[in-house]
Amino acid sequence: MQTRTVATTPYDDQKPGTSGLRKRVQVFRQPHYLENFVQSVFDTISAPQGATLVLGGDGRYYNREAIRIIIEMAAANGFGRVLVGRGGILSTPAASCIIRKYSACGGIILSASHNPGGPDGDFGIKYNIANGGPAPEKITDAIFAASRKISQYRIVDTAEVALDTLGNYKIGDMTVSVIDPVADYAELMESLFDFDAIRALVTSGFRIQFDAMHAVTGPYAREIFVNRLGAPAGSMMNAEPLPDFGGGHPDPNLTYAHELVAILYGDSAPDFGAASDGDGDRNMILGKHFFVTPSDSLAILAANAHLVPGYRHGLAGIARSMPTSAAADRVAKALGIPCYETPTGWKFFGNLMDAGKVTLCGEESFGTGSDHIREKDGLWAVLFWLNIIAVHNQSVETIVREHWARFGRNVYSRHDYEDIPGDQANSVMQLLRASFAQLQGAQFGDLRVKQCDDFSYTDPVDGSVSTGQGVRIIFTDGSRIVFRLSGTGTEGATLRIYLESFEPDVSRHHLDAQEALATLIGIALQISELRKHTGREQPTVIT
Ligand code: G16
């Protein structure tokens, strides 16, 4: 087996974003582009000789080709073993589970998550550390620095990388283990939830519909819901993973999961609906004619965790990203446990979980999870909901309304303005930052600004500081508007506006969120001068 050292020159755009490096497929296909990034990862982590690496992706276009290249590079860089999912497939939560279970030094996950795939779509790559979670900023910064000065990479030439047959084979001194992508993950789920209770529920007339959006969760959902829990095969839709996700946008929200939404809001709607994204870490939960916001979902899971076997012993704490609503904070207060507010990005939860400070984490961006792994976990959230429903024997809507009646309702919505030219998006953010002094104490009808700032976070475990994490306008009654630029897009900029108010009055809980938040929406447009700067009249996506 011949190891080749290939001369290369740096690309200057390999800075990982909120979750790894995401670019158009054509960008990744430039000569040496993927190789440069992978070698920068290997040079940064300096894994001990013979270490184990986990490898897999969401099956999107370019997945197999990238897997082959990374295996060849791992063999040339001294790894002892690569655990790769059959067909090059691993959902993000399954990869996290496998890294932890087999004590790997880390893993490489190939995904651009919810971004569309195909030859003209997006591709992505990220490195996860030994705890199974996304590399923290100090590592991603070091990877970026390495990518700026790379001059060579190492690779072996091998006749074939066999990905479709389970088993072990050798490339030089390195063992490639092709593993079942589903088995370890399904076993972990079975250890956390009451599968007997969920089986009784889904086989007794309670109808569920799961939309895999032609992305990675199809095989996982079939194994868990159909094979192990007895749900009818027809309750799974779009369950065949496709390299271009069937031309869809595998983002489980009210806009992009419209096929499922139409079914759940239709005449003969099932009792429960859920969808997951490209790589299986996001979830959307729906009841019959009812949408559960991700912020409420986190709060409700926390309030009911004692009903679920894996969490019966109680929660150490809860963490949520700053733009996520404070619904979970109210539950934490009632439970007498801490609630941490972190910047956007699952990587910020890892330290808190490793230190035993939190058990459940969640984000408004349709991510929920726990310390069972170190990634958010779409199917885990679906199982958690089904377990709670099986115990309560109530509809999704009733569970949510009873929760609001007990804790009050944090009315919440996010407005996304996608694909704005970067300079326009930056001018909106600059204007807001420049307006802090003027906004402080300003009165807008009944609302008075109590505080405005750019969120920064000091990690309570390692003391690292992250600044510039989103502009917050907080009013004296607790309502908030948050402005942030997305860190996951590949084209132009996406400006996100997060809106939240608190409604303790049960007689107003039925209000539509957009209606209830109309005043805040007006203030957000006024102070950001968004329409003037961008020419946009309406958000692209409202969740
Ligand atoms: C990623 C991160 C999440 C983050 C989300 C949105 O999710 O893992 O922690 O909340 O992006 O980020 P942004 O608002 O910067 O676009 P995923 O599912 O894309 O990996």
Image: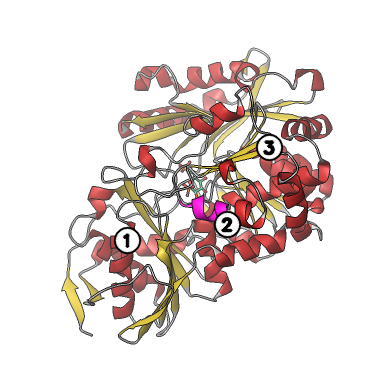
Front in this rendered view, residue 451 or 325:
325
**Is residue 219 part of the magenta span, yes or no?**
yes
Is residue 455 placed above or below 270 in the rendered structure? below
User: Which mark is first along the chain, 3 or 1?
Assistant: 1
- Residue 63 relative to residue 238: left or right: left
Q: Amino acid at mark 3?
A: Asp
**Is residue 320 part of the magenta span, yes or no?**
no
Looking at the rendering, the stretch of residues picked out in magenta corresponds to: 216-223
Quadrant in which residue 453 is drawn: top right
Q: Quadrant of the C terminus?
A: top right
- Residue 454 relative to residue 165: left or right: right
User: Which mark is first along the chain, 2 or 3?
Assistant: 2
- State how many labels appear: 3
Q: Position of residue 420 (x, y in %)?
A: 34, 29
Q: Position of residue 318 (x, y in %)?
A: 70, 51
Q: Amino acid at mark 1?
A: Arg
Q: Amino acid at mark 2?
A: Glu
Mark identifier at residue 64? 1
Mark identifier at residue 17? none
Question: Quick one: label 3, few (<14), some, or many (20+) residues within 10 Å?
Answer: many
Quick one: SS at disc 1? helix
At 72% from the left and 42% from the top, the residue drawn is 299
Mark identifier at residue 223? 2
- Check if mark 1's residue and mark 2's residue have beta carbons within 8 Å: no
Quick one: SS at disc 3? helix
Spatial separation of the CA atoms under disc 1 and disc 3: 38 Å
